[in-house]
Every structure is written in structure tokens, then in C-alpha cells.
Image (cartoon, coloured by chain):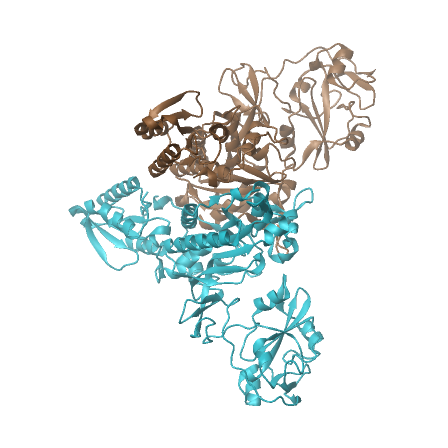
Chain colours: A cyan, B brown
Amino acid sequence: MKMSRMFMPTLKEVPSDAEITSHQLMLRAGLIKKMSSGVYNQLPMGIRVFNKIQNIIREELNAKGCQEILCAGIIPSELWEESGRWTAMGEEMFRLKDRNQRDYCLGPTHEEVFTDIVRQEVTSYKQLPMNLYQIQVKYRDERRPRFGVMRTKTFTMKDAYSFDIDEAGLDKSYQDMYEAYTNIFNRCGLDHSPVQADSGAIGGSSSAEFMVKSEVGEDDVVFCSGCDYAANMEKAESVKYEAFKEEMKEIKEVSTPDVHTIEELEAFFKLHAGRFAKTLIYDADGKSVAVVVRGDRDVNETKVANAIGSVVEFELANEAMVQAATNAEIGFAGPIGVKTDYLFVDEEVAAQNNMIVGANKTGYHIENVNHGRDFEGVVGDFRNVNEGDKCPKCESALEIARGVEVGHIFKLGTKYSESMGANYIDKDGKSKPIIMGCYGIGVERTAAAVIEQHNDENGIIWPLSVAPYQVAVVPVNMKKEEHTEAAEKIYNELQAMGVEVLLDDRNERVGFKFKDLDLIGIPMRITVGKDIVDGKVEFKLRDQEEKELIGLDEIKSKIEAEFVKNNVKLG
Amino acid sequence: MKMSRMFMPTLKEVPSDAEITSHQLMLRAGLIKKMSSGVYNQLPMGIRVFNKIQNIIREELNAKGCQEILCAGIIPSELWEESGRWTAMGEEMFRLKDRNQRDYCLGPTHEEVFTDIVRQEVTSYKQLPMNLYQIQVKYRDERRPRFGVMRTKTFTMKDAYSFDIDEAGLDKSYQDMYEAYTNIFNRCGLDHSPVQADSGAIGGSSSAEFMVKSEVGEDDVVFCSGCDYAANMEKAESVKYEAFKEEMKEIKEVSTPDVHTIEELEAFFKLHAGRFAKTLIYDADGKSVAVVVRGDRDVNETKVANAIGSVVEFELANEAMVQAATNAEIGFAGPIGVKTDYLFVDEEVAAQNNMIVGANKTGYHIENVNHGRDFEGVVGDFRNVNEGDKCPKCESALEIARGVEVGHIFKLGTKYSESMGANYIDKDGKSKPIIMGCYGIGVERTAAAVIEQHNDENGIIWPLSVAPYQVAVVPVNMKKEEHTEAAEKIYNELQAMGVEVLLDDRNERVGFKFKDLDLIGIPMRITVGKDIVDGKVEFKLRDQEEKELIGLDEIKSKIEAEFVKNNVKLG
């Protein structure tokens, strides 16, 4: 492609509404363009990268015997009613009607559709296992779209679904996808880690997220410093803190005016935060929920929502709901006499004695409170891991890092096959539900994660595998025919070789061109300048400082060597 | 791919709800699966064909310097309000709201979005010309989805938009697309014709449809038997019939009980149909419209709607509207005293004397009616061409054939750039609206048209260029190791060559396999049977009866020769 004709609206300035590096660079390098909140158009440089990631995904999945299909993006409500998710998906699902007032959604995920396809065609164990996937635009009505293509209302997703006759088959399918995902993200140049994860609204038993460590990640990921334990915060566990134990004392109400936070309580009572229990009030689809954890812990909302069951919207209660539950201002909620639909007590709280809790009375706390004696709730693990907690596997210190989730693999089991009647006849003639797995990769998000890990102050540094173009040829002086003609000749030769090459034939100074090419991150640059009279050009890699003067006859081998080094197929 | 593991649900029976060959064969060969009315999922065999068509489109457009982008599928209403189409698109556009009650549509076409992208980035004539395209899922709430993927609520479309500084530039862009489309449809193996077309709701001045002649086509296409004139019926013109001329006589009311149709009138008055004028009443967005054409003509609704201007819904009026306009039962409408918002008179009617028309009185007609003397309406060409009419260019006889529209190219002009303010600064520093063109191809419909033209009683006969797989290797007897091992070896060798090859390793009789492979239309078949002991296999082309015994060492060259013959790149 000749850059003089290329639609590549690069920006000199950092866009003011772009907070994170990948978002800034995607906008600055002209990869994407915002249309409205959480809705982006993909420009030529962007779609080339996204298509390359898609092709890597295709190759790795096909190598595992997966088969590509493509489902319609609008899905009739009937399928979602069968699975029970027409309601469960809540506001995140876009809904619409056709001219006959029939209900559809814009597919936010496709378990129902794949299950429907398979139940219509698969009858016998002989037809299984099977793994079907699609690469498709998904729609989710995000409450807070942000970070460019990291969280949007519409994005491209590869979703795959496996169908097996038993758990052993599912284990194999899951393992295959685990390997395929590892290959995919390695080929994209991503330093990534698979971590244990919660299965969320999709349902099912076991799942792993492929996380790219990044300061801008929206997820907290817990890694063990001593073993391979890694889990999303939503799912992560740690060894319980040692419980404070002593004789139970009598409860005592204490006036604590203007004391609201745990820090204020620590100062007031001169006690460690672990001696307090804090009670938070949540709103779960209109039901009130009290959760009690130690003062040095945070509530893990996912664990609480899972304990309740199918919750669509789970959020901190508003003031009215808190007052109805506690009869007090916010800051004085406690477990004794709290009027909520649910009361959950973290096991660390249940294990210790004589805690200090809110009194459900504005300006008061209660000392010497004991679970079992003074109040009773459902006991379980409802807390977040803290940095430095002990690993549940090896007791080494846990670390917390931010991560971007680029892929997710789930063992669904029979959740969808049972509710939707997707059965097969086994060897003995018995009808059994098909065992399913599901597996997703966000395409644009993967590209954003690559940028987060591969950039410098000048712009993007694309790995060769996903670069929009692989080589740029730059004539130094557009007025010198010896520069422009030699450059065009090299450009034509590289194209004939199958290299994806840009010719920077823009009427601009060479410094301007270098800046643009660094910004858009083209891996190799060939500059045609004064040394062309000696048959030499400058060769430079984007990720290295050094420039090298090479002969025209060396260009081909130099470039081929980079393809070999990066394990990328040429042409 | 090994067929034992392939998800390819073929059907022996013709599905009862599939009326046309391509629909039947797409279902029978397992290319698509219906999810709901007008909504299809694409199965592995289907998506491979659709992807190949997409890649042919990409190659030909890229060769013309077009650049691929991808717009979001949900579009905020604001853009459509700017162009005035939020209302104009009517019920065909799917609309939805996000959680903040903001309005979006599912993009049925993308003029607004492309214009928006370009107006934000293009300021100078130096940035033009430019041609941007996308391959994307479109959504249209069709009133009557039918014929499989021919007319659906969701389908894949390549839409391209050109941006030029002047009409000469647009002519060049249009010509480039004309050439690209010709190449694309030729490569798909389609016998097609570009025909003049109406520009419809998209707007603009000049347009051509790429039509595939087919009995199942939804469009009537007018072709000249003597020259290259070809036009969609909506747009087609012909030389006017000779007008009946005589002295004007006095009008006379005639009782015509039980005479309603033109045939009945001809019999009753013993006159040729051309001596009658028939008056049809239409409903144009609630406004009543009377159209008068000769008795031997049909009304051309598109021409009438264009004469009114921006009409969303145009259909025959219901009985109530007819009675309000004519004060009579249906069958007796006439131009004299008709109470409609519009009255259009075909020029053939205006040109002749003493016509017989309905009396707007049940059971009566009027003789000797003359336009100008007895009634007055807007005169123009409001009629359809009849088979055998004279060509407007060369006066040879016109023929009418059914056609499937697979592509459409439009000269839009400044319709969108003016309404949306997409301007550029010209060489002299003046601001001018960008001149636009737009260009569409329906991907699945193209595949269906290929099937309509390439099939026999046994199934599809894919051209090599778009075949889901190019070669099938069939072991005759799955119990004979010499068959299965040789077949697998050939399969592996062909894969290594880059051939897209199926190994039919299913535990079925060879006749069953042949039937399936004929149905799904694989262009080349290699059968490994008893002659393998002499190092020979059977080679057969899907589109020919002959089978040939060839040596194992000839397989490669045989296949390569087919690729060369069909001008398809191997690997």
C-alpha cells in the first residue's frame, strides 16, 4: 500500500478522553474511531490487526479439530426463555422487536444457539465429541464502557463450544482449548497467565481466565509467589487469618459519635482492624443483603451473589434500603437485629470472639459480639484475598496484580443441555445430556493488550505476527528520483515476495515519516537515502535502536530472517 | 478434514418449506440452518463458501485501491436524523434503545456512518479520491423473508463508498467498481449482466444492478434483443405504443354491471385493451394516489413513488381508501372526479383520444374520455415495459427475464455529503461537498445465485473458486486397509500441497459417500478402490460424467491442471 493513498488518520496529540496507553495509541495511530459511547468503528490499520488475530485464532482452533460456523446476531427470545436467561441476563442484553412484535436479543453470548443447533443434529454418541466456534460481533449494553476497545457495547469475539459424552471427554476438550489458547496468545506476543475464575452468568463448574498482567487491567488477579496458584479475585481463596479467641464477654453498647470508618474505629478503640466486623448492605435484584466480614477484609461480591443464586443486578444498597435495614445512618450497620432478606457471615468473623460491630443505631457500636450467641447468619467465604495472604495450596505469600482478561474457558457441564434437552444416545441405548464447555476470546481486547505490553514513548511496537504491515519502505527525499525510484522498486519486489509492505511516498520530511511509522509500529523499516548511490539502504527494527546499512541484495534475506526468527509465515 | 468428524448435517429429503433450488440444496447439503423466519445460522460447509466469496471480493477491491474498514453494527439515531433517514427507512429498519434510553438502529446500510467517518478526517482535495469498504452483517426487518438466504433479516454485505472531488472522479470510481464487480462475479462462476436500476431509498442519480438471470429471481429485468440495453423493470423504458387518435367525442356513461377486469371490458365493448385506461388507487404513507395507465399496461410503482418524492410505504390502497376516493366498489375507479391527493397519468393515456374509463360509480364506465378536456393529472412515464416492446435505444424487441440481484452500484452524488456537511477544500481554497458513490454485494445471495446456476439432480456443482473443499478422497471399502491407508496417504499429500481436501473416512458404503459428495458439490473426487494394487485410483470431476483411472504419480499434476484451468490459486 502506498501511504499517500492510505486512510490513516494519525494524531499528534494524546486524545483527552483516552486514559490508558492502548486506547491512546489506538486512536493516535488511527486504528479505531469512536462513533458513540462504547461504540467504535475500525479503520484500515485497525482491521488489519484484528483480522490477523482472528486468523491466528482460526489456525490454532482448526489445528485442534474445531469447526467454524457463524450464528445469526439476532436471536429469538424463545431460546433464552428455554435456558432461563431471558430474564437472568438483565440490562446488559440489548433487546428489540421485529415488525411483528416478536422479541429478539442481540447475542451477547451464544450458548443457547449452539446448544439449539447441536440438539437438532446430534442424536448418537458416534457424532461426538465436537467443538464448534464462530468469530462474531457481540453486543453488550455495558453500564460503563471505557478504556477504548477494552470494554465496549459491541466487539468481536471468538466463542467456541465443545460437546462431549462424558466428563473425561470434557476434560480433553478443555485441555485442547487450554493449549490452543496458550498458542494463540504466545503467537500474539502476549505474556499471559491462565488463572482460576468464577463462571459468572454463563454457569458451570470450572473455568480459567487468560490474563495479561497490566496496570490498566480491570481485574484483580491473585498470584502465588511460591507455586502456580493463580485466580481471579472473584474466585481467589487464601488461608484464614488467625482468629482472636477469648472468653465471651457481655455485649455493651458504646457511644461512637462521628466514628464511621474502620480507621476511625481503630483509633477510637485502639484495636487492630481485625477485631471489628463490618456489615455492608447490598441490593440483589431488590432484595436486601447484609454481609459481615472482618474490618481488615473487603466483601467479595461475586461469592455473595453466588451464595444467593441467580442474581442479575448486585450492588451496594442505596441510603433508603440501608436505613430500612438498620434504622440508622450509613456507617452504623451491624449484624444484630438487622432487617435484611439475607445475612451472610464470613467464616473469619464466625470463628472469633468479642468483636466490635455497628449497633444499627446512629452514633453507636456494640462490643463483645459473638456469632451464634448474638446473631446468626449463613457462614462461608465471603471475603477478598488481601496482598500477602497465605496461598491455599502452599501457604506462600499471595500477590495481587491487575490483569486484562483476553480469554476465558469454562466447563459448562449440563447446564444448557439439560434445560434445553440436548441429549445423545449412548452405547447402551440410554439417553444422556451432552456435556458442554465454552471458550471465548475478545479479539479487539487482545489487540489492546498487545499494545499495553508492546509500546514505547514513540508509539506501538507490533509483534511481527499481528502487525498491520510488516515492512515500511521510506524514500528520504521525495524530490530525488534516485530515492523514490529505488524505494518503489524495493516496494514492488517485497510485495512480490508476499511481504505486507507500505511505501511511504507522502510528500513529507523524512523525520515526519519516521515519527508516523514509529507511532503505527511497523516492525521493519527500510530507508532509501544518500547511500543508494552505493547500492545501500538503511535497515532498522522498530524494537531496536540500531540502524544498519545493508546492500540491496541483502534486503530479502534480512527480512526473511526476521520472519523465521519470529516464527511468522511469509506470504 | 476427515468427514467422520465433520459437522455436516445433510438431508436426503427436500425440505418442505424450501421453494427454490438453491434454498433446497443449501439446506440439504448442510450449509445453513434456519433459526427463525429470515434468520439463518451458517454451518461449516456454508461458512467456507461464504468466506471464499468474501476473499474474492477483498482481493478484487484491494486491487482497485479500496481500503477495508469495519463499522459498528449499532448506529446512534443522530446520524440518521442528520441525513433524514431515521424516518424514511420505515419498518425495514430494526430499532433499539440502550439502558439510557438512547436510540440506535441495526445498520441496514452504512452511508451515514461512512460519511461521518470521512467528514471528520478529510479536509482537503489532496486526501481524495478514496474508496472505503467493509464486509459486515446487515439487518433488515423484511416484511416477507423468503427463498432461504435470498431474502433474510440478517445477511453479510460488502458495502463500499467512494469519495471524489468531482463528477469525473466519481465516473472513474464507478467504472473501477464496475470492473471489480465484473471480475468478482466472473471468478464466482456467475453468468451475470449489469442492468440500469432505480436508486431507491439510497438516493442518488445513476445506478446499475448486477443481475444473475434465474427463474427464481425476484426482479423482472428488461433486456434488449438487439443492443446492450438492460434495465431493471423498476427503471426500464420502452418506446410508447402508437396512440389511438380521432376526433374527441362527447363523454357517455355506460352501464357495465359485473364488468370489472380489462378482459371483461374487452369482451363487453369488443375493443382492444389499449382503448381503455385503468385507474389504480395507492396508499403512499397514508396519502391517496390515483394512477392512470392504458388497459394493456401495468403501473410501475417505483416510477410513481419517485414522482411523489420521499415515500416510505407505497402499496395498493385498501377498500376503505378506494371507496373514499371513488365512492364506488373496487373495479370502477376512473380519473374523472376521483378524490385523491395525487393523480398521475401515463403519457400514453394523455396522448390518445376517447378512452373508456371507470365512472367512480359502481356498475358504470364512461366512454370518450380525454385527458386535458375531462380530467387533468401529472403526465409522465408511470408504466411497466411489456415483453416485445420496442427498445428505447435501438427499437429492437425487448425481452423480460427474472433475475437475482447480486450487486448494486450507485452514483450518490452529494445527497449525503450535503445533508451531513462532508466537505473538502479544493485547489482554489473553496469548500465543496464531496461527491459520493456506493457499492454493495450480498455475500450469501451470491452463493445462492451460484447454486442456482450450478447444480444438477444430484446436488450442487461448485465452481472450484468457491467450493467449500476442492477435492474429496474416498476409500471404497473401509474394512480394507489397502484402501484406507492409501486414501489417508493421498489426503495427507494433498493437504501438504495446500489443497483443501476431505477424506471420506465414514463407515458407510461407497455409494452413500458418492451421493453425499455429489450433493455438497466437491469439484474433484479421487476414489481409492481395487486398482490401488496396481497403483491406480479413479479421478472424477463433479461437472463431468467420465471417470478416469490414473496412476498415483499423476494425482498431483491432474489436480494442479484443474487449478490452472479454473484460474484458482493453489494453497
Q: Residue at x 59, y 44 (%)?
A: A429
Q: Relative to B126, is B298 on the left or the right?
A: right
Q: Relative to A434, is B91 on the left or the right?
A: right
Q: Which quarter of the figure is the N terminus of chain B placed in? A: top left
Total numbered circles? 0
Q: Relative to B59, is B236 on the left or the right?
A: right
Q: Is residue A210 above or below residue A317?
A: above
Q: Residue at x 30, y 49 (%)?
A: A472
Q: Nearer the viewer, residue B434 or A21?
A: A21
Q: Which quarter of the figure is the C terminus of chain B placed in? A: top left
Most extreme residue toward the front, as rendered? Answer: A428
Q: Residue at x 24, y 52 (%)?
A: A539
Image coordinates for residue B496, horizontal then vertical, percent: 34, 39
Image coordinates for residue B289, horizontal then vertical, percent: 71, 30
Q: Is residue B168 above or below residue B394?
A: below
Image coordinates for residue A217, horizontal then vertical, percent: 46, 64
Could one spot residue A549 in this view of the protein? yes
Q: Residue at x 52, y 53 (%)?
A: A437
Q: Is residue B319 above or below residue A12?
A: above
Report which quarter residue A548 is drawn in: bottom left
Could one spot residue A30 in this view of the protein? no
